[in-house]
Image: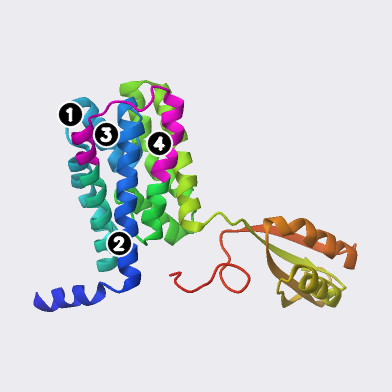
């Protein structure tokens, strides 16, 4: 037993990077609780996942939202331990859930649940955005907000699904269930709120830079590479490939640019070779020279 405890403590990192993560997670829990108190609870807008179900219990039987959220997280916490990193996941998730639950019940107890505004659309938009900021801060701290967010993170890591889509899938149940109690207009607003919060979470955790990746096939490889280097200041990678129809070897140019540089890239390629073939795709993130530094990203 003592050996297991020692192993557990060794796997928990208390370095500066981790302390910064813990601070982000606590701040994220507070921001989520603030969104709940300010915009969601007063207008019976139900958020997603376990906390959404806790909101339903609160509206129906006046049970504390934070406490119900904490109890509902226990089974999913066990699942997260298995798939999301053991002790490090455990500490971050416990910190996130406790921060959210404590801040939620304290804010509601101290300030009540009087609405900031009676406009349900404004509550939906600002509540969803603020909730997403809180979630994004938790993700930035390499944590999860517990609940069905654990399932969302498993989908994100195991299947490559974006955070916003995974969050939408796992958190829709409570919002739809709310339609049976508070009307389908509230439920529909709740779905919009989840979408907004997912987008905001992506913005905070992954940044707002829009990156594009380009694959270029041309007979003027040297001219295109030179133009991209001199005019855009971007590096390129030449990949040796073989044409599926001609079965001839030919180079393929790969490069990464920002969305604002795509038009210039197209012009440069066209000027070098009007007959070139080019594919431009979306990239979630670019780390390294010319983009965000790779240091500190895990």
Pointer 2 and pointer 4: residues touching (CB < 8 Å)?
A: no
- Where residue 236 appears, x then y in whole percent? 72, 74
**Dot placed on the residue nearer the N-terminal end, 4 or 1:** 1
Q: Please report the residue visible at 73 percent of the width from the left and 66 percent of the height from the top.
A: 215
- Where residue 15 appears, x then y in whole percent? 30, 74
Label 4, residues with CA under 10 Å away: few <14, some 14-19, many ≥20? many
Q: Please report the residue visible at 50 percent of the width from the left and 46 percent of the height from the top.
A: 199
Q: CA distance from mark 4 to mark 1?
A: 21 Å
Residue labelled with disc 2: 22
Label 2, residues with CA under 10 Å away: few <14, some 14-19, many ≥20? many
Label 1, residues with CA under 10 Å away: few <14, some 14-19, many ≥20? few
Q: Is residue 223 left or right of residue 151?
A: right
Q: Is residue 89 left or right of residue 6?
A: right
Tell me if residue 273 can be seen. Answer: no
Q: Please report the residue visible at 48 percent of the width from the left and 74 percent of the height from the top.
A: 295
Q: Which one is closest to the eye, mark 4 or mark 1?
A: 4
Q: CA distance from mark 4 to mark 3?
A: 14 Å
Relative to 60, does residue 96 appear above or below in the rendering?
Answer: below
Tell me if residue 126 can be seen. Answer: yes
Residue labelled with disc 1: 62
Q: CA distance from mark 1 to mark 2?
A: 31 Å
Name the element at disc 1.
loop
Name the element at disc 4.
helix
Pointer 4 and pointer 1: residues touching (CB < 8 Å)?
A: no
Residue labelled with disc 3: 55
Quadrant position of the N terminus in the picture: bottom left
Q: CA distance from mark 1 to mark 3?
A: 9 Å
Read off the magenta span: 104-132
Pointer 1 and pointer 3: residues touching (CB < 8 Å)?
A: no
């Amino acid at each position: 037993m003592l050996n297991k405890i020692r192993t557990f403590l060794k796997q928990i990192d208390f370095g500066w990077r981790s302390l910064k993560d813990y601070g982000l997670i606590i701040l994220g829990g507070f921001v989520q609780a603030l969104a709940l108190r300010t915009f969601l609870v007063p207008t019976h807008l139900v958020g997603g996942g376990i906390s959404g179900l806790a909101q339903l219990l609160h509206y129906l039987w006046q049970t504390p939202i934070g406490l119900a959220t904490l109890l509902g997280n226990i089974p999913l916490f066990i699942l997260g331990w298995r798939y999301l990193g053991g002790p490090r996941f455990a500490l971050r998730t416990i910190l996130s859930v406790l921060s959210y639950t404590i801040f939620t019940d304290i804010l509601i107890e101290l300030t009540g649940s009087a609405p900031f505004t009676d406009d349900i659309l404004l509550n939906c938009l600002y509540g969803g955005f603020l909730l997403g900021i809180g979630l994004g801060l938790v993700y930035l701290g390499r944590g999860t907000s517990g609940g069905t967010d654990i399932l969302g993170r498993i989908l994100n890591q195991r299947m490559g699904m974006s955070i916003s889509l995974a969050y939408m899938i796992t958190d829709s149940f409570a919002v739809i269930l709310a339609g049976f109690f508070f009307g389908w207009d509230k439920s529909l607003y709740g779905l919009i709120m989840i979408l907004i919060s997912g987008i905001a979470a992506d913005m905070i955790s992954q940044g707002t830079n829009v990156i594009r990746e380009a694959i270029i096939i041309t007979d003027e490889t040297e001219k295109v590479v030179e133009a991209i280097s001199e005019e855009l200041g971007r590096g390129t990678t030449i990949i040796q490939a073989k044409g599926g129809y001609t079965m001839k070897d030919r180079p393929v140019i790969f490069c990464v640019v920002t969305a604002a540089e795509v038009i210039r890239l197209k012009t440069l390629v066209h000027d070098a070779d009007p007959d070139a073939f080019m594919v431009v795709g979306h990239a979630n993130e670019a780390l390294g020279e010319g983009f965000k530094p790779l240091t500190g990203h895990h």
